[in-house]
Amino acid sequence: MTTPTTFAELGLPAQLLTNLTKIGYEAPSAIQAASIPLLLEGNDLLGTAQTGTGKTAAFALPTLAQVDPNSTETQVLVLAPTRELAIQVAEAFQTYSEGMRGFHVLPIYGGQPMGGQLRGLRRGCQVVVGTPGRVMDHLRRGTLKLDALKAVVLDEADEMLRMGFIDDVTWILEHAPEQRQVALFSATMPKPIRRLAEQYLNNPKEIAIEAQSSVVDKIEQAFWMVQGTNKLDALTRILEVEEFDGLIMFVRTKNATIEMAQKLEARGYQARAINGDMTQKLREQTIGELKEGHLDILVATDVAARGIDVPRITHVINYDIPIDPEAYVHRIGRTGRAGRTGKAILFVAPRERRLLRAIENVTKGRIPQMEIPTRDEVSAKRVQDFKQQIAEALQHPKLEFFTKMVSEYVEETETELLELAGALACMGQKDKLLLTDEKPERAPRSFAGDSDWHKEQRQPRQPRVHDDSGMGFYRISVGYQHQVRPGDIVGALVNEADIEKSSIGRIQLFDDFSVVQMPVGMPDNLLSHLKQIKIRGQAIAVEPIDERDVPEQKRKPKGDRPFKPRGDKPRSDKPRGERSYGDKPRSDRPRSDRPKPGPGANAKKGSKRRSNADAAGGQSAPRRRTYD
Ligand code: ADP
Ligand code: MG
């Protein structure tokens, strides 16, 4: 995200340059290098760049350069779509302005008591960062005055539009002095925003930073087609194998955030829900906890997570695919912050393929398909983590004490050293097995595999009587053409032919026929009985077929390696397609990559999972929260 230019070359004052060095920004990002000189010259500006490209500094630095700290009048007004963003932007101004005597920045937003805001406004602050509604309030009351305003910044303009603030923004612009600079920043440039820019910006300079050079490229993306395993099981395996630091997971509803966070806590993760129902204070607190490493996983809705900037987020999991493809870009922009890389995993149910294509259109690239880790890989990861723990224990300051004690034990009992080590490992692991249980993988659950997790609670898991190898393929003479859905087929087989639901495997629909997996060797009389069934009014014929006769492109890709991009279609936009996802040994990664766990974080490296004992008692016990 950096360009060869330096901040000094952009014409920023010395005080700001010193601060940037202190903060550790080495070079301006593309949007910063382009915007800062233009804004310093007093131009209006229309800037488009993906999230995570450093837009805040792109407007904060040049506007700060114009602020006169000796006057307490409001000179810069930033409008932001959410409280979180207003706070974040205000914090950024605070950081960049270190040492500017007499300088004050104030965030103002709805849901916060007026008292503090009024005091802040009365005291005077050169920069006000606010949500449109609250800014309007203060302008109407006369508690915020714009007479001395030099610049207005519209941050995340597309989001303000989406949240219905466009009229408020217009109203505010109408009430700002004629002679002011306007900078509009947005991740995308929808028509209404362009119109607003045409009306209120004065000969704006336009900067568009291509998405390719920004966040999307720094994020390894992959999708998993929900199949065979339910989403929660798949998630659990991914969490075990992926080496993540902070992780944010997106679900569709507020209830799902809470339920999912509880499920994860029950599985030993430090997880918490964040949604629009929570009080502002609780949301801020929760994000703070993630920042400091007291929490590792946030389960969020789109609205609640908008704009969260926590550098330690290494992974974004789209547990529920977003309906709005733009939201996907915003979601994955929560990782890959501050020049780091990130990973984004997307769960796609077969009937959500359309949404996947829409996302690929927006991100302008194919997202590679991945497979979930196999049980063996999960076991291997546990073993690897365990060995890592041994290596770490060997460096522990108390090692000497324990070694002495153990050597006494060996003398007294003449135990073999290797056996003794095994016994100690046993003690250390207690009942947590390193190897996953040997249950066969469940047979594909056909289209039911995308069961959201409510469904899963309703239907206790049924043990499968067979595994993949006992399944054969049967051709049924109805398909898309007949407006048949997989549910119709399951219904007919279960209700009419007395076939157990648990023995129906994957169902694939084709144009004028379908292929159903059922146990091999279905007796003839059963097959002929099936012929009397109608599906959607259509009499059907059922016949066993050879696996090789199942049309190729619809078949689940073979090979068990996780995150392997599907190689079935050559891609022209190669880099992303070629990337093989996650199959490099983890130990290759330099350790310094990984930020240290903060206080309260798991001391163990590798697995993020806290032991179940921890999860059951004390601070991380599953709990139901109520939000007001
Ligand atoms: P955007 O508004 O485009 O989504 P932000 O302004 O929130 O992006 O910046 C994303 C992250 O990048 C922040 O953590 C910010 O501190 C960091 N950042 C911004 N500019 C630079 C820079 N020049 N060098 C390093 N990090 C930067
Ligand atoms: Mg921003």
Image: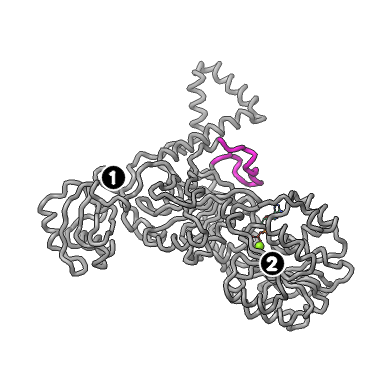
- Residue found at x 35% / y 47%: 557
Q: Earlier in the sequence, mark 1 or mark 2?
A: 2
Q: Which quadrant of the figure shows ligand 1? A: bottom right
Say few, some or many: other residues with alpha carbon within 10 Å of mark 1 (under 14 / 14 to 19 / 20 or more): some
Task: Measure the C-alpha gap from mark 1 to mark 2.
Answer: 53 Å
The residue indicated by pointer 1 is 468
* Residue closer to the observer: 537 or 8: 8
Q: Is 233 within the magenta?
A: no
Judged left or right of residue 295, residue 527 is left
- Residue found at x 52% / y 43%: 611
Vertical relation: 112 (above or below) 258: below
In the rendered image, which quarter contains the C terminus?
Answer: bottom right
- Residue 86, label in figure: 2
* Residue closer to the observer: 521 or 564: 564
Secondary structure of residue under mark 1? helix
Amino acid at pointer 2: Ala
* Residue closer to the observer: 19 or 358: 358
Magenta span covers which residues? Answer: 588-606
Q: Position of residue 575 (x, y in %)?
A: 51, 48
Q: Position of residue 350 (x, y in %)?
A: 37, 58
Residue 288 lies in quadrant: bottom right
Judged left or right of residue 143, residue 595 is left
Q: Position of residue 253 (x, y in %)?
A: 49, 65
